[in-house]
Image (cartoon, rainbow, N blue to C red):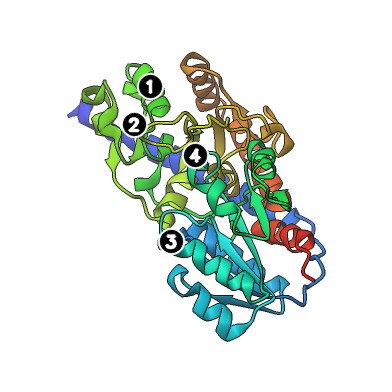
Amino acid sequence: MNALKNTNKSDASETFQAGFLEGYRFGGCQAVLERIPKQRSPSKSNYRVLYIPQGFEAIDRGVVEALSELTAECIVADPESALTMAVATRPDLVLVMNGLHVFPPDHEKQILAIRERGIHTAIWFVDDPYFTDDTVRIAQCFDEVFTHELECVALYRRMGCPNVHYLPLAANPQIFRPVRTLPEYHYDICFIGNAFWNRAEIFDQMATYLQDKKVLIAGGHWDRLTKYDQLSRFVRSGWIPVEETVSYYNGSKIVINLHRPTTAGSDNRNSMDIQGGSINPRTYEIGGCGTLQITDVRGDLTAHYEPGYDIETFTDAAELQTKIDYYLEHDQERLQLAWRSLWTTRLKHTFHERIGRLLAEVKIL
């Protein structure tokens, strides 16, 4: 009976501590948001823009909201009806998001037909460099090419595209934001994403280390783990809705970010072996939730965040484990980095800022 009482006291103490830390974290996030200076919006464009979404809510919603605020009119059409809507509405610009995955086979013919009618066209590639076998062909159909990947700017120029621009990704603050979370979303360590081979390898290397931690590994293809028997209790298979992703990011003490590999193979169409230098959307999205992120390193990371100040980095499993241990034992330092990451993300890395830059780059006659 005494052992049971002691167990109940221990559980209650841990629950109280978790609740206290969650409230403290969220309160700090609110304080950060209240102190962010109100930024002057870019001048509103007179352009009427027809936007063709990719079908990824986290990106599309942010782009549409920004276009609605920064242009005379934002019209949204699905990929199948791009030409029909362009002819009917006669926009100044047709902006296509990515042009991959959900677009019909005649998509490029539609874009060329739109251009023949004197309507300016632009595409923003946000999956570079993983599908460059396809995007180098698609890019040549557009007047303007935007890519989030620095390493692809020269590629598209070599392919004859006259107007190529680097435009990094961002976070939608209406979606990826600090929220209060229920206990079922509280974890020590969280990773959400598909099990590309480099990701599976890292978690296999950490299988023994993770056994006494509260861990969530969510996404597809995690049966690739060679140590699945040790890690299966941490795995939630399948797609995680955006709203739940936000709750997991907020509720976790540490969120790991691992960029996918760029090599050609079953997961990529990148036979030119273009290397990835730019950070993924997850980097901004985790930052927007006010949670400590530990990420592998991409070349342009330091152009957006400062390792050791508003983000943390690792180079291998051993370093990742060392840093996880440190930040799980040092709550205040962990929260300070998380709050700074929220500040940086909200101040510099929103779709409102990115779309303002895009519109400034577009030159419509």
Looking at the image, is mark 1 or mark 4 earlier in the sequence?
4
What secondary structure is marked by label 1?
helix
Q: Who is closer to the viewer here, 231 or 75?
A: 75
| Residue 262 place in picture, x, y as percent | 50, 31
Residue identified by numbered label 3: 103
- Say what secondary structure mark 2 lies in: helix
Element class at badge 4: loop
Residue positioned most to the bottom: 88
Of marks 3 and 2, which one's residue comes earlier in the chain? Answer: 2
Q: How far apart are the alpha carbons under marks 3 and 2?
A: 54 Å
Q: Is residue 160 left or right of residue 197?
A: right
Which mark sits nearer the N-terminus, 2 or 1? 2
Nearest to N terminus: mark 3 or mark 1: 3
Q: Is residue 313 above or below residue 342?
A: above
For marks 1 and 4, give the CA distance: 19 Å
Q: Which residue is mark 4?
A: 130
Q: Can you give x and y, in whole percent of width and height, for residue 18 in the image? A: 44, 40
Q: How busy is the neighbourhood of tag 4: few (under 14 within 10 Å), some, or many (20 plus)?
A: many
Measured as percent of width and height from the top left, residue 164 is found at 71, 50
Residue lying at 71% horizontally and 32% vertically, measured from the top left: 302
| Residue for badge 1 | 201
Q: Is residue 335 above or below residue 350?
A: above
Of callouts 4 and 3, the N-terminal one: 3
Front position in the image: 91 or 8 = 91
Q: From mark 2 to mark 1, how far is it between C-alphas?
A: 35 Å
Q: Amino acid at mark 1?
A: Glu
Give the mark toward the camera: 3 or 1.
3
